[in-house]
């Protein structure tokens, strides 16, 4: 498997005014070759939670695609992952040049069962565009209009509530270290909020807390509560996005818990803030301009 990094294209990321594939493509496409072993392709699809992998030659020219459905069929019918990708890949693949209009790609993904299409530049695969990518680039069209602003022009809806992640994976203090590690590995998490039966936040356990026990003779404690960090920076759902952003800029942790009356109700990560800023660039620019003006007023 090989990430593509050699082709130089102007960097664009989910621009609200995106029209073409090149405006939304992501660098570092994950690919496999026809000679890749099936179990490696399977591992990649499961670990990265993607629905398919472009199959390319040494020059990154498209030769086919292998999908999670192909691999599921193989596992279900033959209970094996032996062999090479070339034996099971689909060779007739729809792809699009980087200059293709997103509207055309959207029509393709509407009329076909697959969820993503490879994107090419000068005949070489440089990225993929998925249905999820089209959702992200169009979400701003369906967001509600800005709410009433405060006296200094600060929108009342620039709060943690607007971007926090709900439906959290948590762990209890009495759970074992093995359970914590399994959750982190299975869901690619860097840390877990620790809560009691009432979802009251009592700590957090991170990969860094556990790493000292990976090698050497140090015996790990048996329960999460013995190793968790209890000194936690938290915010409320009504706290400002700007306060949270400042916190994440000036500290080494990647996310902060959102609590209400001590109860964990969400998390906000650096990635959440990035996505929020991208969706609200115009409003944020307006707000920042007003801030500058107010600073000049005696």
Image (cartoon, rainbow, N blue to C red):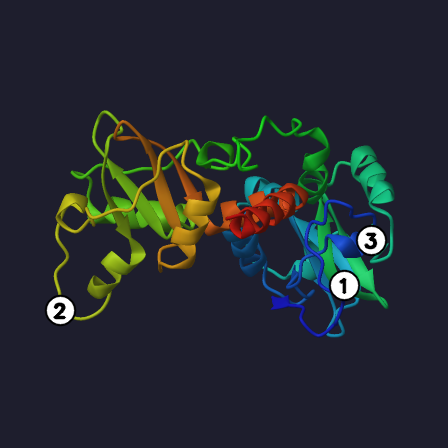
Secondary structure type for disc 1:
strand
Estimate how packed mark 3 is, as few (under 14), some (14 to 19) or many (20 or more) residues with alpha carbons within 10 Å: some
Q: Name the residue under label 1.
A: 125
Secondary structure type for disc 2:
loop
Residue drawn at x 71%, y 40% is 131
Residue drawn at x 46%, y 32% is 161
Secondary structure type for disc 3:
loop
- Count of picture labels: 3
User: Could you tell me if residue 147 is visible in this image?
Assistant: yes
User: Which of pointers 1 and 2 lies earlier in the amino acid sequence?
Assistant: 1
Residue drawn at x 51%, y 33% is 162
Q: Mark 3 points at which residue?
A: 95
User: Could you tell me if residue 71 is visible in this image?
Assistant: no
Residue 219, position as x, y percentages in the image: 12, 61
Indicate the quadrant where residue 125 lies: bottom right
Left or right: 121, with 243 as reference point: right
Q: Which of 281 and 182 is in front in this view?
A: 281
Q: Mark 2 points at which residue?
A: 217
Spatial separation of the CA atoms under disc 1 and disc 2:
47 Å
């Amino acid at each position: 498997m090989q990430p593509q990094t050699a082709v130089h294209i102007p960097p664009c990321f989910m621009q609200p005014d995106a029209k073409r594939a090149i405006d939304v493509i992501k660098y570092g496409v994950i690919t496999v070759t026809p000679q890749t072993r099936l179990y490696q392709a399977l591992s990649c699809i499961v670990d990265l939670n993607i629905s398919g992998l472009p199959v390319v030659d040494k020059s990154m020219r498209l030769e086919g695609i292998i999908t999670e459905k192909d691999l599921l069929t193989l596992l279900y019918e033959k209970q094996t992952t032996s062999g090479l990708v070339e034996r099971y890949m689909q060779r007739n693949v729809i792809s699009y040049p980087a200059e293709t209009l997103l509207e055309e790609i959207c029509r393709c993904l509407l009329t076909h069962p697959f969820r993503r299409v490879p994107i090419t530049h000068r005949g070489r695969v440089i990225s993929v565009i998925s249905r999820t990518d089209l959702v992200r680039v169009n979400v701003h069209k369906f967001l509600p209009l800005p709410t009433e602003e405060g006296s200094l022009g600060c929108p009342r809806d620039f709060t943690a509530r607007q971007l926090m992640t709900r439906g959290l994976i948590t762990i209890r203090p009495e759970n074992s270290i093995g359970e914590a590690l399994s959750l982190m590995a299975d869901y690619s998490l860097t840390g877990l909020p620790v809560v009691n039966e009432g979802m009251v936040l009592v700590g957090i356990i991170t990969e860094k807390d556990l790493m000292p026990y990976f090698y050497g003779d140090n015996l790990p404690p048996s329960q999460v509560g013995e190793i968790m960090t209890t000194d936690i920076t938290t915010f409320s759902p009504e706290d400002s996005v700007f306060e949270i952003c400042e916190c994440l800029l000036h500290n080494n942790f990647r996310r902060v818990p959102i609590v209400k009356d001590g109860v964990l109700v969400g998390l906000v990560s650096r990635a959440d803030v990035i996505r929020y800023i991208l969706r609200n660039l115009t409003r944020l620019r307006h707000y920042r301009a007003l801030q500058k003006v107010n600073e000049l007023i005696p």
